[in-house]
Image (cartoon, rainbow, N blue to C red):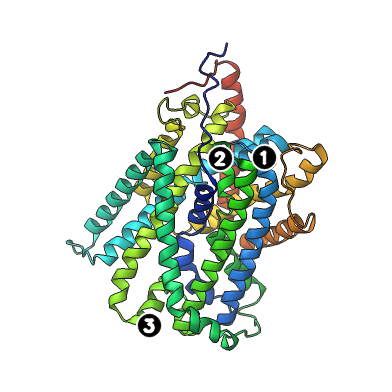
């Protein structure tokens, strides 16, 4: 029998500003600081870089518009887990939560922490003591672990402390990117007509553009972030549409401005294959000394993404545990802080384990492909909600229906096909990760049938 504390839930304390900042923080991460130089290796000219960022922004915005309807029809915690569970089958809901736990949140937290360490050590010009540099690698990993622990504790203390920290870091990130974009924005806009829009050849054909778009979409991932915390928003019908749309639009503008700065400052041939292309652009304009300062600023900016991942991920595990599809202790709400404290700790532990295990060089494609499966299914679910009229009284209808969801479905599917053709190993690994969750789902069902489940405070 369910006990009296079973009904204790998370509180609706978060507002539109915090929800929007979470969207912005989730989208602006490692990708925007590293991908444009890699994109240049697959594109025929600098103009194509700007076009890819604009087109990627349109895809992300179309997805955000679709989630506007989904999230207001089902304004609870969990994001895709909730949508797929209700619209298809609990198995698909379990698989999206399973994938989120393994690669959707924990891996980006670890990657962001390691990136923070890299930028900070570079900016402070800390040099290795040993010849092989192993001591520096260890120090960087220790720093990353400490950062994860600190931010895990911050969000464990409650949404007020966590959201306040999130808002400050997001504001810092926007200021940093606006500052970088502003350095060359004027020239970039004035000289936009001079950007190279060469016709793609056999070396930079549709596949090359497709690879560049995959990198762009990784950088735009996170446009659906506020949907995961719908159950903690004061007024979800008002806050969700605004946060999804405005958060995505803010990031599109920032991304385009920053890339105008890059292509104006750096010769197209010179930027090819350069990961730290933002730093290179700043050095071109203001000299070598800017590199150290920029490294420190980017390190600080990455903390915003790390913080947002730590805030959002546990809400998925909490929702799964509440439905008896995850460990029972993940459903427990802290009696004082009223957050899913155990879920927050679980995620922190997994992220720390990933930091210890190794690097994440191939995780961009791996993560993007795996999560694209579920966002595709979720957006297709809009057609199902219209038929079943789920949450019809609360729904904020997607603009441009059915063109908007169809556009997202077609473009996302096309990019997934290109991803599999050009990056078969990472794509296959992503599919296998998802499929590995299937037997665990049925094992878990068998366990829960023979075990009493209750939700309680810690």
Which residue appears at 57% of the width and 82% of the height?
45
The residue drawn where x is 55% and y is 21% is 7
Task: Choose mark 3 or mark 2, whichever is in front.
Answer: 2
Q: Gap in Å between the C-alphas at discs 3 and 1?
A: 47 Å
Q: Determine the secondary structure under disc 1.
A: helix
The residue tagged with tag 2: helix, strand or loop?
Answer: loop
Other-residue count near label 2 (Cα within 10 Å), few / some / many at <14 / 14–19 / ≥20: many
The quadrant holding residue 234 is top right
Q: Which residue is the site of mark 3?
A: 284
Residue 330 place in picture, x, y as percent:
48, 29
- Mark linked to residue 233: 2
**Looking at the image, is mark 1 or mark 2 earlier in the sequence?**
1
Position in image of residue 166 (x %, y %):
43, 49
Residue at point 52%, 73% (across, down): 257
Q: Give the mark nearer the N terminus: 3 vs 1.
A: 1
Image position, residue 385 (x, y; %): 77, 41
Mark 1 crowdedness (10 Å alpha carbons): few <14, some 14-19, many ≥20: many
Residue 252 vertical position relative to residue 182 in the rendered view, above or below: above
Residue 252 can be seen in this image = yes
Q: Nearer the viewer, residue 426 or 272?
A: 272
Q: Secondary structure at mark 3?
A: helix
Q: Position of residue 141 (x, y in %)?
A: 30, 51
Label 2 near label 3: C-beta < 8 Å? no
The mark that comes first in sequence, 3 or 2, is 2
Residue identified by numbered label 1: 83
Q: Is residue 85 above or below residue 306?
A: above
Query: Residue 148 versus residue 371: which sits nearer the camera?
Result: 148
Which of label 1 and label 2 is nearer to you? 2
Q: On the rendered structure, is 160 left or right of 429? A: left
Considering every residue shown, the one lying at the far top of the view is 1
Residue that sits furthest to the left in the current view: 129
The residue carrying pointer 3 sits among few (fewer than 14), some (14 to 19) or many (20 or more) residues within 10 Å by Cα, namely some
């Amino acid at each position: 029998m369910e006990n009296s504390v079973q009904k204790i839930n998370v509180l609706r304390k978060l507002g539109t500003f915090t929800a929007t900042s979470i969207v912005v923080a989730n989208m602006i991460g490692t990708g925007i600081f590293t991908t444009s130089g890699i994109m240049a290796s697959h594109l025929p000219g600098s103009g194509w870089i700007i076009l890819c960022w604009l087109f990627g922004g349109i895809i992300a915005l179309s997805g955000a518009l679709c989630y506007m309807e989904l999230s207001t029809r089902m304004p609870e915690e969990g994001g895709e887990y909730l949508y797929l569970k209700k619209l298809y089958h609990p198995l698909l809901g379990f698989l999206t939560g399973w994938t989120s736990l393994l690669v959707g949140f924990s891996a980006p937290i670890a990657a962001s922490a390691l990136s923070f360490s890299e930028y900070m050590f570079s900016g402070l010009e800390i040099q290795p003591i040993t010849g092989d540099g192993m001591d520096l690698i260890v120090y960087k990993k220790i720093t990353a672990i400490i950062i994860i622990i600190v931010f895990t504790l911050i969000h464990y203390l409650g949404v007020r402390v966590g959201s306040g920290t999130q808002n400050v870091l997001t504001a810092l990130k926007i200021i940093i990117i606006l500052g970088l974009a502003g350095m060359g924005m004027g020239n970039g806009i004035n000289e936009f007509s001079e950007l190279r829009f060469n016709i793609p050849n056999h070396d930079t054909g549709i596949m090359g553009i497709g690879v560049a778009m995959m990198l762009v979409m990784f950088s735009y991932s996170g446009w659906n972030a506020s949907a995961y915390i719908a159950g903690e928003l004061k007024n979800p019908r008002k806050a969700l549409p605004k946060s999804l749309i405005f958060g995505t639009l803010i990031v599109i503008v920032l991304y385009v401005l920053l890339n105008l700065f890059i292509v104006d400052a750096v010769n197209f041939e010179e930027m090819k294959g350069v990961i730290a292309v933002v730093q290179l652009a700043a050095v071109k304009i203001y000299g070598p000394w800017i590199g150290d300062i920029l490294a420190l600023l980017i390190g600080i900016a990455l903390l915003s993404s790390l913080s947002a991942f730590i805030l959002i991920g546990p809400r998925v595990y909490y929702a799964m545990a509440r439905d008896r599809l995850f460990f029972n202790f993940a459903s427990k709400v802290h009696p004082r802080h009223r957050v899913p404290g155990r879920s927050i700790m679980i995620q922190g532990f997994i992220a720390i384990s990933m930091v210890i295990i190794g690097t994440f060089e191939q995780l961009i494609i791996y993560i993007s492909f795996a999560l694209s499966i579920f966002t595709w299914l979720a957006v297709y679910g809009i057609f199902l909600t219209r038929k079943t009229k789920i949450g019809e009284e609360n729904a904020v209808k997607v603009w441009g229906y059915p063109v908007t969801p169809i556009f997202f479905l077609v473009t996302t599917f096309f990019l997934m096909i290109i991803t599999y053709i050009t990056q078969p190993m990472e794509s296959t690994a992503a599919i296998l990760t998802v499929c590995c969750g299937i037997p665990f789902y049925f094992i878990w069902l068998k366990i829960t049938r023979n075990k009493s489940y209750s939700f309680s405070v810690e």
